[in-house]
Image (cartoon, helix red, strand yellow):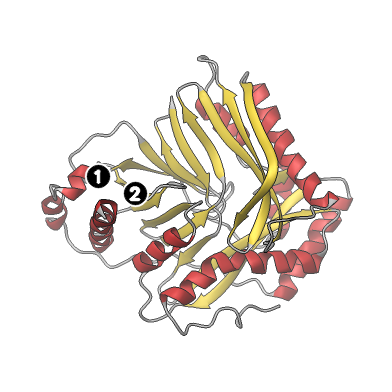
Amino acid sequence: MKEEIQNSGVIRFCRLLLQKGITFCLYRYPGADQYNIAIQKGVLSFNNEADFVIAPFIGSDNYETVLLQKVPLQAVADGRFYNELMQLDDCLINWGVLPAETTKEDYLKRIHQYLEYISDEKALKAILSRVKIIGKPADFDPFIFYKKLSSAYPETFASLFYIPDKGIWTGASPELFLKKENDLLYTVALAATLPRSRNGIYKWRRKETREHDMVRRHIEHVFEKNNCRLVKSNGPYAFETGRVAHLKTDYVFEQPGASDLDQIIADLYPTPAIGGLPVRKALECINLYEGYSRNYYSGYLGETNGQDLARLFINLRSMQIGEDAIAVFVGGGISDESDPEEEWEETIQKSFTLLEIIEATTPGVPNKNEVIR
């Protein structure tokens, strides 16, 4: 009950931040109940050693990395920041521009372009994403949506952030990018997708296991390059989230005192799960054929102080809320074993993570019938 009351106060505080046009991020860690807030620096009179970073996907035009400050929750609970905020002028929400929708015909065409690129031995795997546009209900409330999303997927990193000109983004990511506590570093290989099984039993084909192994090899190479010692690995095992299951391997590495956290992040991102392999060739394929700018989709976000603390997550299962419409982002890995129809169906299954919550938030809104099969 105490956590619920505190979270309600956090939501009220975020509504005021939005009203004042202040950049912020509302977020909850996997397995936790407590909501947290980070806001743009210099707005309120407090200091916090931990920053919060929102980074776009590599190569996203006009979308920059944003650094925020984590707000002490006690200061939100006792109301000391409200008077400061109330002195500021109200602002209209500055909506970002949504990308165009990707039709099934267009997506299948792009898959064939990817396959041609891969067949020329330029890449082993490249991620192809797409955009699903739905009309935004007149009474759609992003904070009510966030509460339902967070509750429905407790195993994910749930976030909602607002950046003027870039709009409101929200999502429930199943993928840890990097966690650091003192000298220990935690990450996961999360790749390969099948529809969720009712009995929890999965038959992973060569395509899925190969895709997962690519991610594992990349992770192990990056940490070896940075002189980090493997402490423990667990997996691969089936990780269920929403309507799908992924192959997942958990890693724990030990970081020597002389190694650079920022360098590890730079070497690890983009992971093969959101870019592909080899990294440079996969990014070239994406830039040539994906057909739009991902912006903050498949970037990363979370807390860090740049030294001995990091809790960063890939921005997956995410959507951008516009003034009149909502853009839902989904994607999958394309390799020489990909079947275009299967890849399309995989993105449909992934899209339900968000579409089902939109329907639950605003009853009567069609989503399942709207998806083009």
Residue 34: which numbered mark, if any?
Answer: 2
Compared to residue 128, the image places residue 77 above or below, namely: above
Instruction: Where is residue 170? Give x, y as percent.
Output: 45, 60
Residue 73: which numbered mark, if any?
Answer: 1
Instruction: Decide if residue 123 is in sight here.
Output: no
Q: Is residue 159 left or right of residue 245?
A: left
Question: Given this view, does label 1 or label 2 mark the residue nearer the observer?
Answer: 2
Instruction: Where is residue 2? Give x, y as percent.
Output: 24, 52
Q: Secondary structure at mark 1?
A: helix
Task: Give the amino acid type for the residue marked by disc 1 in the picture.
Answer: Leu
Q: Is residue 111 left or right of residue 372?
A: right
Using the rendered view, name the quadrant where residue 149 is placed: bottom left
Alpha carbons under labels 1 and 2: distance apart: 10 Å
Q: The N terminus is located in which quarter?
A: bottom left
Q: Is residue 372 left or right of residue 164?
A: right
Task: Give the amino acid type for the residue marked by disc 2 in the picture.
Answer: Gln
Q: How many marks?
A: 2
